[in-house]
Amino acid sequence: MTKRALISVSNKDGILEFAKELVALDYEILSTGGTKKMLQENGVPVTAVDEVTKFPEILDGRVKTLNPMIHGGLLGKFDDPSHQAQMNEHGIEPIEIVCVNLYPFVETISKPDVTWDDAIENIDIGGPTMLRSAAKNHQYVTVIVDSNDYPKVLEQLKNQGSTTIETRRELAAKVFRHTAAYDSYISNYLTEELFPENLTITYELKQTLRYGENPHQKAAFYQKRLGSDFSLAYATQLHGKELSYNNIQDGNAALQIVKEFDIPAAVAVKHMNPCGVGTGTTIEEAFDKAYEADPTSIFGGIIALNREVDEATAEKLSGIFLEIIIAPSFTEKALEILTKKKNIRLMAINFAQEKQDPFKVVSVEGGLLVQEDDAYGLNDANIQVVTDRKPTEQEWEALKLGWSVVKHVKSNAIVVTDAQMTLGVGAGQMNRVGSAKIALEQAGNKAKGAALASDAFFPMSDTVEAAAAAGITAIIQPGGSIKDQDSIDKANEYGIAMVFTGIRHFKH
């Protein structure tokens, strides 16, 4: 019986060497189109698929392998007398090896000028069909979709004469993962519904992690192939140990906050909450403010900066223990300074390619929660000054800063700020006045003349009372409580300017 291998690949990396090795092992190579041409031009003997099917390629190549002479060879059981009798009757020979990868659909739709017709023409039909047929029949057929598997297959063919059933099963599973991902990219591209009846999301393994949130938990980091460059998944690590599970969570939280600012800004994060946010005319000044906001909690934290790290800033960053520093870039001198610290992770991220993922996905037991990203800012808000006194220009700047930060703090959330930095952060308390007390206590005397931001409305006036006692002079909150008037009256009583935004920013 002739040993046959069918090869039809879009990505031709390593395929010439693989085909030559198969020929040396007495395999007849079947192929089509560009793969056949490339192999022939390099001296590899090839049998055209249409010689086997006795039917020409038609419809501009859309139909070439969809034929019983091919799929009978892929799906027939080699040791089943009934299958063998039918194959012999119709002159079908078995195909032992299938090496196929698919039309570059994802690469095509990633192009900025892609047309609808280009996208549709790059939906592979024959490839996935051959892969699925071969993978279903993996008891007999070796199917390869990844060029990284060529060496393993060749080694077993040379040493044993065939691949092991364990290898064939592993390769078949990889095929079904691959075709499932391929179909999900296509379905998502074609889908216009906000929440379709079936949600398919594909991620690719970026790296396995040493452990998860705790050392006894296994973990891995996956990335979206069509994701934004403005992400730790697509960052360039310039120095330091590999990222941990918690590093990635905290780093992502820091990125989400720092992207709120157009002016130089620095964000320090601990346990996915900001412990210090600072702005300034330079990135050094912004970091100074972020550090000043909470010089205790920043120890062991994650820093995100939205400007290049220069020598002066690097000197200050190197003076404290930090897990990660994230920035668009680092000067040579800054890298020289910071890389003296062996373990610190330095991550460069393409801020110019910031692209908001429109949806957020969170796993729960037995399911997923999917929602639109909270991209609302003050420009989207219906701003109302509800008190007798209006905020001063300085207070407006503080209110804007507070509102930009509070949406990223775990609810119940209260943030105290001046015009350039956070002064106190109260996060994750079971009642709002509890968060306010934490933030105000942290701010201390700096709360006098400062602004207070709340992620949701005040259910009663006690938070205003606490703010007034600490010296707060301006408050920003969504409004919407049935007792709003109580809070307004209390603010008027203490001469506090209060602004309603009409937008809530819960973060659970």
Image (cartoon, helix red, strand yellow):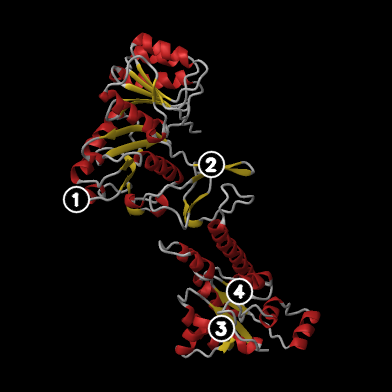
Rounded to the nearest whole Å, what is the CA distance between mark 2 and mark 4? Answer: 36 Å
Left or right? Give the position of 291 relative to 143: left
- In the picture, the disc for residue 243 is none
**Residue 421 seen by the camera:** yes
| Mark 1 or mark 2, whichever is nearer to me | 2
Pointer 3: what residue? 31
User: Mark 3 touching mark 1, by CB under 8 A?
Assistant: no
Left or right? Give the position of 502 relative to 304: right
The kind of secondary structure element at disc 2 is strand
- In the picture, the disc for residue 333 is 1
Q: Earlier in the sequence, mark 2 or mark 4?
A: 4
The kind of secondary structure element at disc 3 is strand
Rounded to the nearest whole Å, what is the CA distance between mark 4 and mark 3? Answer: 13 Å
Q: Which residue does the image show at 25% across and 47% down from the upper left?
A: 308
Q: Amino acid at mark 3?
A: Ser
User: Mark 4 touching mark 3, by CB under 8 A?
Assistant: no
- The 10 Å Cα crowd at callout 2, few under 14, some 14 to 19, many 20 or more, is few
- The 10 Å Cα crowd at callout 4, few under 14, some 14 to 19, many 20 or more, is some
**Residue 159 seen by the camera:** no
Q: Earlier in the sequence, mark 4 or mark 1?
A: 4
Q: Amino acid at mark 1?
A: Lys
**Location of the N terminus (image quadrant):** bottom right
- In the picture, the disc for residue 126 is 4
Pointer 2: what residue? 371
Q: Relative to 475, say whether 280 is above or below.
A: below
Q: Earlier in the sequence, mark 4 or mark 3?
A: 3
Rounded to the nearest whole Å, what is the CA distance between mark 3 and mark 1? Answer: 55 Å
The kind of secondary structure element at disc 4 is helix
